[in-house]
Image (cartoon, helix red, strand yellow):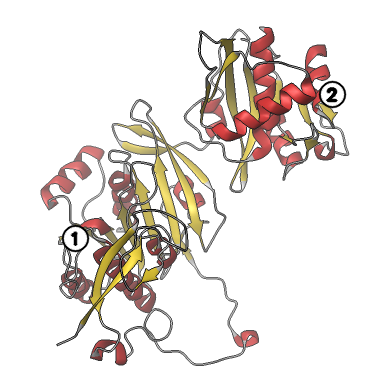
Amino acid sequence: MAKTRTAYVCTECGADYSKWQGQCTACQAWNTISEVRGVSSNSKGARGGRFAGFAGSLSEVQSLDDVSLAEQPRISSGMQEFDRVLGGGLVEGSAVLMGGHPGAGKSTLLLQAVCHLAASVPALYVTGEESLQQVAMRAKRLGLPTKDLKMLSETSVERVMQVAEAEKPRILVVDSIQVMHMADIESAPGSVSQVRESAAYLTRFAKQTGTILFLVGHVTKDGSLAGPKVLEHMIDCSILLEGSSDSRYRTLRGIKNRFGAVNELGVFAMLEQGLKEVKNPSAIFLNRGEDAAPGSVVMVVWEGTRPMLVEIQALVDMAQGGYPRRVAVGLDQNRLAMLLAVLHRHGGMHVSDQDVFVNVVGGVKVNETSADLALLAAIVSSFRDRALPQDLVIFGEVGLSGEIRPVPSGQERIYEAAKHGFTRALVPKSNAPRKAIDGMKVIPVTKLSDALTALEEL
């Protein structure tokens, strides 16, 4: 009989403690330490090599120069946007964690991909939250091929492993990891210990057998993946499906990827036939009106390995009593406050008595600093009530001393804008191309004052 040990683990960073305490000394978070019960390390299973080697399999010591550099073959999911986020396709033996809000379409996207893949490779779909009839009804409504896909309704990890060893699938989907449980763990399904041990057991199976593992995970109120932070360290790829309830578009973003670029973005449209990939996202996010309006400008952001054009809007209005509001949707609100201070200090524009609202059209979240110059241009346009030309595209980082700093892949961004019909670009001087681009007038700037002067002359 294996002994059980009790530990206390921080759900934010995974730090381990011998007793409970209110604050985690590693990440300084409060009330994140919870009790975890698992099999003791002195048990027979642990001495027998349960945690030995790579994912539980023993290996020999070898020189780094002798390691094979043969590229691992990838399996296409049949959707280019899905393959893009995964780094080019599915890698054998990889563990992928997909998260998202309820109703975002996690199960729908995986069911579409697995139904088409099952025609060429063996696949097993394990559902613990729905019955087999519910999944079959959804597949029929979406018009998916269901002949070759094997289904299992189970929440016991041991039972899932027995079926997987008998069926030998190359693709295994577990929906979801929060409802799976192991008999050796004395806690309820969804607890920190159950999620961690179940994910570790499934990941070891995937590594040892070369199975492609998909785990569906829930998210918390702030949009982060639920469960212990160590769960994200176990898997190879973490992707997040985002989208508001009032929009039919969904964005699939890569948070972590050992086989490709991070922050890669795939765009899908939710239709009656399921999620349909959008191969040209810029065309959707640039659906502007015919007449130019103040406070609207187009910027070029870099998502993973490709540029994408999105529209940013700003509204500056007199504050109606009290403190002026600063609202940013799709952008960092703290960075908005910082840029407004730079605009006042180095641009001579006083907006401390104005409400400032900024929004990225289409529900896109912009995390990079290349949107600084476009954001300030939109604010200036709204404050002066003067529309900017619709054939103008802007990007660049703004420093605290008012300098316009270059951004990565600047020339690729300009070429992408020219491809969509833009004829003028306001960019940092270091990002200006050496050779002229046909049909594109590049306006290089080095300081915020130069950029404001250039906007007045347009």
Q: Is residue 326 left or right of residue 441?
A: left
| Image x and y of residue 122, in percent | 29, 65
| Residue type for callout 2 | Asp
Q: Which mark is residue 201?
A: none
| Image x and y of residue 29, in percent | 42, 54
Task: Give SS at disc 1.
Answer: loop
| Image x and y of residue 145, in percent | 25, 49
Q: Is residue 91 left or right of residue 394?
A: left
Q: Which mark is residue 450?
A: 2
Q: Does residue 421 appear in the picture of this structure?
A: no
Question: What residue would you read off at disc 1?
Answer: 189
Would you identify the image quadrant in which residue 216 lies? Answer: bottom left
Of 141 and 7, nearer the camera is: 7
| Residue type for callout 1 | Pro
Give the residue drawn at x 22%, y 73%.
Answer: 161
Depicted 62 relative to depicted 391: above or below: below
Would you identify the image quadrant in which residue 249 lies? Answer: top left
| Image x and y of residue 167, in percent | 22, 72
Q: Is residue 70 left or right of residue 428?
A: left
Depicted 436 relative to depicted 211: above or below: above
Of 456 and 391, nearer the camera is: 456
Q: Residues within 10 Å of mark 1 (few under 14, many from 20)?
A: some
Q: Earlier in the sequence, mark 1 or mark 2?
A: 1
Task: Give SS at disc 2.
Answer: helix
| Quadrant (top left, top right, bottom left, bottom right) of the C terminus | top right
Would you identify the image quadrant in which residue 409 lies? Answer: top right
Q: CA distance from mark 1 to mark 2?
A: 59 Å
